[in-house]
Structures are given as structure tokens and as C-alpha cells.
Amino acid sequence: MGAAPYAIGDLARQTGTKVETIRWYERDGTMPPPARTEGGHRAYTQEHMDRLAFIRHARELGFALDDVRALLRLSDDPDRPCAEADAIARQHLGAVRSRIARLQTLEAELARMVDACGHGKVGECRVIEVLADLSHEHCLHPGHGGTGL
Amino acid sequence: MGAAPYAIGDLARQTGTKVETIRWYERDGTMPPPARTEGGHRAYTQEHMDRLAFIRHARELGFALDDVRALLRLSDDPDRPCAEADAIARQHLGAVRSRIARLQTLEAELARMVDACGHGKVGECRVIEVLADLSHEHCLHPGHGGTGL
DNA sequence: ATGCGACCTGTGGCCGCTATAGGTGCAAGC
DNA sequence: GCTTGCACCTATAGCGGCCACAGGTCGCAT
């Protein structure tokens, strides 16, 4: 009657996801539990396939699973205004931009460190010296706190 | 006789590290186990303090703990050539640069997505649409594979 | 002597998976 | 119909790099 269902491996192949990951999305509440065959194998529909593709795409764009779930809830309800989706995306964009900024600071500092290395002994190595520098004297870095990479 | 030893809280305050993190570095082999008081409290020396500062500084620069341990081994042995330290730092610099590049691709894509949002209903929302796009048609992104953020 | 904060160990949780181990289903070939 | 062998199943543990308890002990100031 209905179209032949997909096995978990079909979803995995088509979306480039590991089988274990798909099962994990289910335990996690990100993917809805599919029907089962008599023997207990998962039997997915096209909707499941689409949903998984959505999830993977959002994850590739760096959205956290919490965000992905929120976006999925929105996409399930096409009449709601999309301001919320927009907000999630904008917020993520902001987070990505600040991560880039932090990494660029790091990049500059690492480059300086590496450039200063005279390729002699560790005893005079600027790399080691800069790291050992308790006072952050030679440091572009703004002091203590997580890197937030 | 010797200078008064530091308590774990002293190290924590001076280096901006949580106490639990210091204990974890010890279990982990990154910090050497300190002497103990009769009652079992950790009693650190200045060397411990310096080592922890080194660790934190390297972590702030985004080095993995494996790298940090390698750098510490090198810094313990000042007569060795510093090529190895240089290599670790260069490798990390490369990793940081490629992370930046990936994030910039992401940034562009997110910005495009957000710009295209007409602020109407979810049904016509470009944000949702782009994410649902199985074929990656509207996508700058190079297909499947981890984001490596 | 007592109070209380800083310390102790041990355990579990966070994110987003990944990787086993040990067992069962199912479909294709004979 | 029977065997093979892969795909599937559940459950559990682990990664990195910590953080946050709980429930108890120590040490120092009063």
C-alpha cells in the first residue's frame, strides 16, 4: 500500500549520518520514533528522511541541537510568523562572528609566537617563554576566562 | 624552613582556575601530585603555581591538553632544540586558521539566510527553507561531513 | 571549644556524538 | 526450506575539558 519504508541504514546513507547518531537523535527527542517491523527494526517514512536532512543541514551550519529542535518545531507550523526562526539564526550568526573574532586574536598571538621562535634550544624558545609568562606581559590576550572557541 | 606552601585555593585564585579543574589536572597527569599536609590537604610549591599558569595560558590559546603536556615536557628540558615546540605551535596555528575559514563560510551562509528572511510566516521563511533544502541547492556549503568547528 | 569556610573524595552531568559487545532479523542465494 | 551473512537491535561506556554536586574532614580564628 504505502511506499516501502526506509531502514535506518537508508537514512544514514542518504543523509551522510552514522546509524548510531540517528538512534541517538531518537533517544534525544530530536527525531520522532518511527514504526517498527515485526522483528523490531525501525521503519522510516519520507518525513523522517526530510527531518533528518533538516537536522544535518542545521548541524552543518553549526546550530546547537536545542536550536535545531526549536527550528523544527517552527517548521512544523508554517502559519506562525518567522520572527522566531529569524531570531535563532541571527543569534547564531552573532555567536559565529564572535567566535571568529576570538580565533583571530588567537591566530595573531600564535603567529607572533611562532615568528619569534629562533629555532634554537628550548631554553631560549619564545614559544615556551610566552606560555610560561605568568603576567601575560607579551600577550595580546585579555586575561583570564574561557576561550569560548 | 621552606616558603609557606600554597593551598589549592591559592592556586585557583592566582591563576583564575576552578579548584575542581586543578584536581582534575592532577588525576589527568597534567599537574604533578603535590605534597600533602598531615590532614591530607594539598600543599603546592611555586613550581606548581608556575606550571598551572603555563597550562592555563596554553589553554587560553586553544592548545589541547595533549599539546599542553607535550609543551610542558619540552619546557622541563631547556637544552633540547625547540623545533618540536615550534611544530606544535605551528600545527595549532594551522588548525586555528582552518577553523576560522570554516566559520567564515558559515558566517556568509547564515548572513545570506538571515538577509533573505522576509519576516512573514514560517511557511515562506527562507531560514527554514534553506535548512530543509535536502539538495543543498541554495547552499555554499561543501556537502556532508563534520563542521569541525 | 567552637564555628565556619576551605578542603577532601567520589560521582554524575554537560554536548554531540562514536564505539564497542553481545545478540537477533531479514533477504537473497541455493 | 535452509543457510549464510549483513544489517539491525539494545545497552553501556568513552571522548575532551571541565563543572557541580553530596557528604564528610581539616584548620584557623575567635
Image: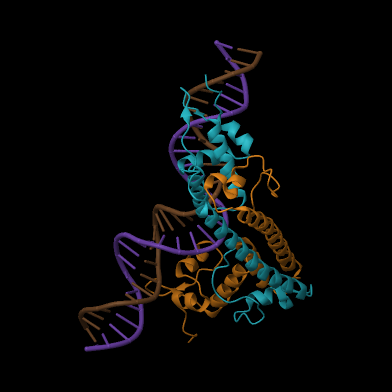
Chain colours: A orange, B cyan, C purple, D brown
- Say above or below: A93 vs B37: below
Q: Residue C18 falls in which quadrant of the image?
A: bottom left
Give the residue at x 51% y 38%.
Answer: B23
Residue C28 as seen in the image, left or right of residue B38? left
The location of residue A123, given as percent across then percent down, is 54, 44
User: From where the camera sits, is residue A17 visible?
Assistant: yes
Q: Is residue A130 left or right of residue C25?
A: right
Above or below, comparing residue B62 to residue B131 in the picture? above
Vertical comparison of B34 with C11: above or below: above
Front residue of B85 and B8: B85
Residue sitting nearer the eye, A32 or A100:
A100
At a point 64% along the width and 48% down the height, the residue shown is A146
Q: Position of residue C14 (x, y in %)?
A: 56, 53
Q: How many marks?
A: 0
Image x and y of residue C5, in percent: 62, 27
Residue shown at 62%/79% (left/top)?
Answer: B136
Q: Can see residue A149?
A: no
- Tell me where residue B24 appears, x and y as whole percent: 50, 42
A68 or A37: which is nearer to us? A68
Could you say which is closer to the camera, residue B109 or residue C27?
A: B109
Image quadrant for the C terminus of chain B? bottom right
* Residue B105 as seen in the image, left or right of residue C10: right
- Compared to residue A84, the image places residue A50 above or below, namely below
